[in-house]
Amino acid sequence: MGMQRRAVLAAIGGAALAAPALSVQAAAAADVYPSNTALYADPALVEGSDWGRRFRRHAAVDDSETATSPALPGTAIVAPHGGGIEPGTSELCLAIAGYHPATMAATGGALYDFWMFEGLRASNNGVLHVTSTHCDDPYARSICGGATRAVSLHGCTPSQAGFPEGTQAVLVGGGDAALRTALRNQLVAAGFTAVDAGAVGELDGNDPANIVNRTLSGAGAQLELTTPLRTAMFATNTRAGRRNTTTTAFWAFAGAVRAAL
């Protein structure tokens, strides 16, 4: 499981996992699996081939980091539908957390805790989508449950967001009103079309059961990027190519989110 450290493993079974169980109702209509637990239990799926997880929780003092990239526990960056499910969100998750997606080298500035679930198939990754209100991955719950604030990265089509086809935009949602405002202001200042997600129903991300809102404060911020915006962030928009071909738009977006944090 790639990026885990001793600090992550020590956290499992802690207070964050003692939170009340998710109130899992019927899975979203588009979801094959009602939870991450159900997906992980499917013998037809192989971890490392069909799906994977990458995560890291920083210790309060982490001597593996440089002085120019201090680890700041308390903030979580998550991508529940990374890899081939909602392409581009894994790479953004890493960059916003302070790591280059190609090398995992610290890019300078604060380092944040992160978690992502990724579809690793060559195609048909959509069947691995578990809606964020049904996310019960223990590492995700531990990392978000130990954070005072969180940001999640998601992908949507322009039509799902109520935009004309081809629109490059991001919907800013989640339960943390102050962080929503800060994110929208920084993204607009960086030249992005950033719209409050409050009028877009399920894309608003303010459900308390949403993994991004399962923080110590009970709130987080959700970013829904349209497909054209994510496409503009990579010269080669494939799972193998994205991490090595990030564009100026990619780094401008990551920088704006980090400025808001």
Image (cartoon, rainbow, N blue to C red):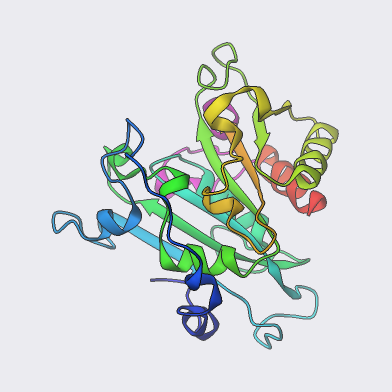
Q: What residue is rendered at 70% in x and 63% in y?
A: 148
| 115, 135: nearer the viewer | 135
Q: Which residues are magenta?
A: 227-247
Q: What residue is rendered at 58% in x and 11% in y?
A: 164
Q: Residue furthest left?
A: 44
Q: Quadrant of the N terminus?
A: bottom left
Looking at the picture, how far across and down is residue 87, in whole percent? Answer: 46, 40
Q: What residue is rendered at 65% in x and 22% in y?
A: 199
Horizontal side of 193 relative to 52 (left or right) equals right
Horizontal side of 126 relative to 86 (left or right) equals left
Q: Quadrant of the C terminus?
A: bottom right
Q: Residue furthest top?
A: 164
Looking at the picture, how far across and down is residue 203, in whole percent? Answer: 56, 31
- On whether residue 43 falls in the magenta region, the answer is no
Q: How many marks?
A: 0
| 181, 56: nearer the viewer | 181
| 13, 221: nearer the viewer | 13
Q: What residue is rendered at 50% in x and 64% in y?
A: 141
Q: Is residue 204 above or below residue 110?
A: above
Could one spot residue 226 in this view of the protein? no
Could one spot residue 213 in this view of the protein? yes
Q: Is residue 112 above or below residue 89?
A: below
- On whether residue 241 falls in the magenta region, the answer is yes
Looking at the picture, how far across and down is residue 13, in whole percent? Answer: 45, 79
Q: Is residue 73 above or below residue 137?
A: below
Horizontal side of 99 relative to 202 (left or right) equals right
Looking at the picture, how far across and down is residue 133, in whole percent? Answer: 47, 46
Q: Is residue 148 above or below residue 256?
A: below
